[in-house]
Image: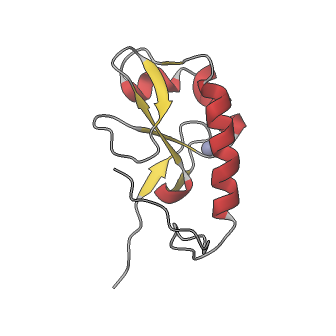
Amino acid sequence: MTVRRPLRTCLGCRKVQDKAGLIRLCRTAEGWVEPDLLGRRGGRGAYLCPDERCLREAEKKGRLARAFRASASLRPGTRERLLALFAAQREEGSRPGDPGGGDGGGRSIGRER
Ligand SMILES: [Zn+2]
């Protein structure tokens, strides 16, 4: 009855971690690396800890390109977006056992399409 959680390796520090704690990256047809927030984009994905150092390592060592098996780089502005995501992810990660989603607010939010 062991529940296996999906594990992925961070491109920066090479540590194997719970996929839920990592940021998934994908590559556009044009060769840009973008965060894949919903994890729904097809194709190859790469994973990073929510840590700027890991992002830098991955870039420096050309691991992004290797992970995607094609040239891949960050578009201007994507780094800032990633850093904001990292911060948000770390905050979320500090709440243990939260299944996610509900913030208990009074307002009901329309369904996303
Ligand atoms: Zn890492």
10 in relation to 89, above or below: above
Where residue 27 appears, as percent x and y from the top left, is 40, 26
Quadrant occupied by the N terminus: bottom left
**Residue found 45% across the figure and 51% down from its top:** 8
As drawn, the residue found furthest toward the left would be 42
Does residue 27 lie above or below 88 as drawn?
above
Image quarter for ligand 1: top right
User: In this orientation, which residue lies closer to the viewer: 21 or 2?
Assistant: 21
* Colour convention of the picture: secondary structure
Q: Nearer the viewer, residue 12 or 113?
A: 113
Q: Position of residue 10 (x, y in %)?
A: 54, 43
Left or right: where does residue 28 sit relative to residue 12?
Answer: left
Q: Is residue 9 above or below residue 74?
A: below
Residue lying at 59% horizontally and 26% vertically, measured from the top left: 78
- Tell me the residue at 62%/33% (across/down): 81
Q: Based on the displayed image, in which of its 4 quarters is residue 60 positioned? A: top right
On screen, residue 68 above or below 54: above
Q: How far across and down, in percent of the image, does residue 32 sit?
A: 46, 19
Horizontally, is 57 left or right of 42 in the view? right
Going by the image, does 56 lie left or right of 4? right
Question: In this orientation, which residue lies closer to the viewer: 110 or 63?
Answer: 110
Residue at image coords 68%, 29%: 80
- Residue 79: image quadrant is top right
Q: Residue lying at the far bottom in this picture: please name it.
A: 1
